Image (spheres, rainbow, N blue to C red):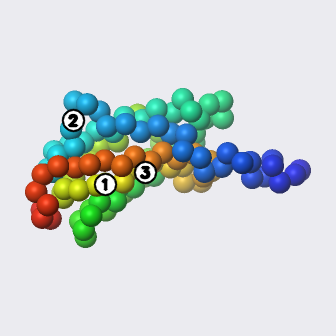
Protein backbone atom coordinates (compact mmCIF):
# COMPACT_ATOMS: atom_id res chain seq x y z
CA UNK A 1 0.00 0.00 0.00
CA UNK A 2 1.38 3.43 -0.86
CA UNK A 3 0.85 6.89 0.65
CA UNK A 4 -1.72 7.89 -2.03
CA UNK A 5 -3.97 5.03 -0.91
CA UNK A 6 -3.56 5.79 2.80
CA UNK A 7 -3.97 9.55 2.48
CA UNK A 8 -5.34 10.61 -0.91
CA UNK A 9 -4.86 14.21 -2.03
CA UNK A 10 -8.62 14.87 -1.82
CA UNK A 11 -8.80 14.37 1.98
CA UNK A 12 -10.28 17.42 3.67
CA UNK A 13 -11.56 19.09 0.50
CA UNK A 14 -14.62 21.37 0.53
CA UNK A 15 -16.91 19.01 -1.38
CA UNK A 16 -20.07 19.43 0.70
CA UNK A 17 -21.89 22.44 -0.77
CA UNK A 18 -23.77 24.65 1.70
CA UNK A 19 -26.19 27.45 0.76
CA UNK A 20 -28.61 29.67 2.66
CA UNK A 21 -32.21 28.80 1.85
CA UNK A 22 -33.76 31.92 0.28
CA UNK A 23 -37.00 31.41 2.25
CA UNK A 24 -35.17 31.88 5.58
CA UNK A 25 -32.99 35.01 5.41
CA UNK A 26 -30.43 35.07 8.25
CA UNK A 27 -31.83 37.37 10.95
CA UNK A 28 -31.16 37.46 14.70
CA UNK A 29 -33.75 35.37 16.55
CA UNK A 30 -35.18 33.68 13.43
CA UNK A 31 -34.51 30.12 12.24
CA UNK A 32 -31.91 30.07 9.46
CA UNK A 33 -31.94 27.08 7.12
CA UNK A 34 -28.79 25.98 5.32
CA UNK A 35 -29.31 23.56 2.41
CA UNK A 36 -26.77 20.76 2.02
CA UNK A 37 -25.66 19.25 -1.31
CA UNK A 38 -23.49 16.11 -1.24
CA UNK A 39 -23.14 15.65 -5.03
CA UNK A 40 -19.49 16.76 -4.93
CA UNK A 41 -18.66 13.81 -2.66
CA UNK A 42 -19.49 11.16 -5.24
CA UNK A 43 -18.64 8.43 -6.02
CA UNK A 44 -17.21 7.79 -2.53
CA UNK A 45 -20.08 9.46 -0.65
CA UNK A 46 -20.10 10.61 2.97
CA UNK A 47 -20.33 8.74 6.25
CA UNK A 48 -21.90 9.50 9.62
CA UNK A 49 -21.25 10.67 12.23
CA UNK A 50 -21.16 14.24 10.95
CA UNK A 51 -20.71 17.44 12.92
CA UNK A 52 -22.19 20.89 12.39
CA UNK A 53 -20.26 23.77 13.92
CA UNK A 54 -21.42 27.38 13.85
CA UNK A 55 -19.07 30.10 14.99
CA UNK A 56 -20.41 33.63 15.33
CA UNK A 57 -19.11 36.68 17.11
CA UNK A 58 -19.21 36.87 20.90
CA UNK A 59 -19.58 34.36 23.70
CA UNK A 60 -23.00 33.08 22.58
CA UNK A 61 -22.04 32.76 18.93
CA UNK A 62 -20.86 29.13 19.11
CA UNK A 63 -23.20 26.20 18.39
CA UNK A 64 -22.56 22.57 17.52
CA UNK A 65 -24.55 19.44 16.78
CA UNK A 66 -23.64 15.85 15.91
CA UNK A 67 -25.63 13.76 13.42
CA UNK A 68 -25.07 10.09 14.28
CA UNK A 69 -27.71 8.20 12.28
CA UNK A 70 -28.29 10.14 9.07
CA UNK A 71 -26.50 12.83 7.15
CA UNK A 72 -28.52 16.05 7.23
CA UNK A 73 -30.16 17.55 4.15
CA UNK A 74 -30.64 20.87 5.94
CA UNK A 75 -28.93 22.54 8.85
CA UNK A 76 -31.05 24.74 11.12
CA UNK A 77 -29.81 27.28 13.62
CA UNK A 78 -31.09 30.39 15.39
CA UNK A 79 -28.51 33.19 15.43
CA UNK A 80 -28.45 35.09 18.73
CA UNK A 81 -26.18 37.88 17.53
CA UNK A 82 -25.69 39.81 14.30
CA UNK A 83 -22.55 39.65 12.20
CA UNK A 84 -20.71 37.04 10.21
CA UNK A 85 -21.20 33.38 11.15
CA UNK A 86 -19.08 30.52 9.84
CA UNK A 87 -21.10 27.32 9.26
CA UNK A 88 -19.12 24.07 8.93
CA UNK A 89 -20.40 20.56 8.23
CA UNK A 90 -17.82 17.79 8.31
CA UNK A 91 -17.38 14.07 8.67
CA UNK A 92 -16.05 13.18 12.11
CA UNK A 93 -14.35 9.82 11.58
CA UNK A 94 -13.29 9.77 7.94
CA UNK A 95 -12.34 13.45 7.65
CA UNK A 96 -12.64 13.21 3.87
CA UNK A 97 -15.15 15.93 3.11
CA UNK A 98 -16.39 19.12 4.64
CA UNK A 99 -18.39 22.17 3.70
CA UNK A 100 -17.98 25.78 4.83
CA UNK A 101 -20.20 28.80 4.40
CA UNK A 102 -19.98 32.36 5.70
CA UNK A 103 -23.40 33.75 6.59
CA UNK A 104 -24.07 37.45 7.23
CA UNK A 105 -26.72 37.68 9.96
CA UNK A 106 -28.61 40.98 10.28
CA UNK A 107 -30.30 42.40 13.37
CA UNK A 108 -29.19 43.80 16.73
CA UNK A 109 -25.42 43.73 17.32
CA UNK A 110 -25.73 43.12 21.06
CA UNK A 111 -25.90 39.57 22.41
CA UNK A 112 -29.36 38.25 23.19
CA UNK A 113 -29.92 35.33 25.52
Q: How many marks?
A: 3
The image quadrant of residue 36 is: top left
Q: Secondary structure at mark 2?
A: loop
Give the alpha-carbon distance from disc 1 to disc 3, as whole Å. 10 Å
N-term-proximal mark, 2 vs 3: 2
Dot in front, 1 or 2: 1
Q: Residues within 10 Å of mark 2 (few under 14, many from 20)?
A: few
- The residue shown at (74%, 48%) is 8
Quadrant assignment for the C terminus: bottom left
The crowding category of the residue bearing disc 3, from other C-alpha atoms within 10 Å (few below 14, some 14 to 19, many at least 20), is many
Of residue 48 and residue 19, the one placed in the foreground of this image is 19
> Going by the picture, which residue comes out furthest to the bottom?
59
Q: Position of residue 100 (x, y in %)?
A: 44, 48
State the CA–CA distance, disc 1 to disc 2: 15 Å
Q: Nearer the viewer, mark 1 or mark 3?
A: 1
Q: Is residue 87 above or below residue 112?
A: above
**To which residue does mark 1 refer?**
85
Label 2 belongs to which residue? 24
User: Alpha-carbon distance for marks 2 and 3?
Assistant: 18 Å
Q: Is residue 8 left or right of residue 68?
A: right
Mark 1 secondary-structure assignment? strand
Q: In the rendered image, which residue does mark 3 sit on?
A: 88
Q: Is residue 36 visible?
A: yes
Q: Is residue 50 visible?
A: no
Amino acid sequence: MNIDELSPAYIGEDRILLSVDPSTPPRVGDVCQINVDYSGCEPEGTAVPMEMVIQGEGANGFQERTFRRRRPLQLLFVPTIAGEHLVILREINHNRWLGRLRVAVVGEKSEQG
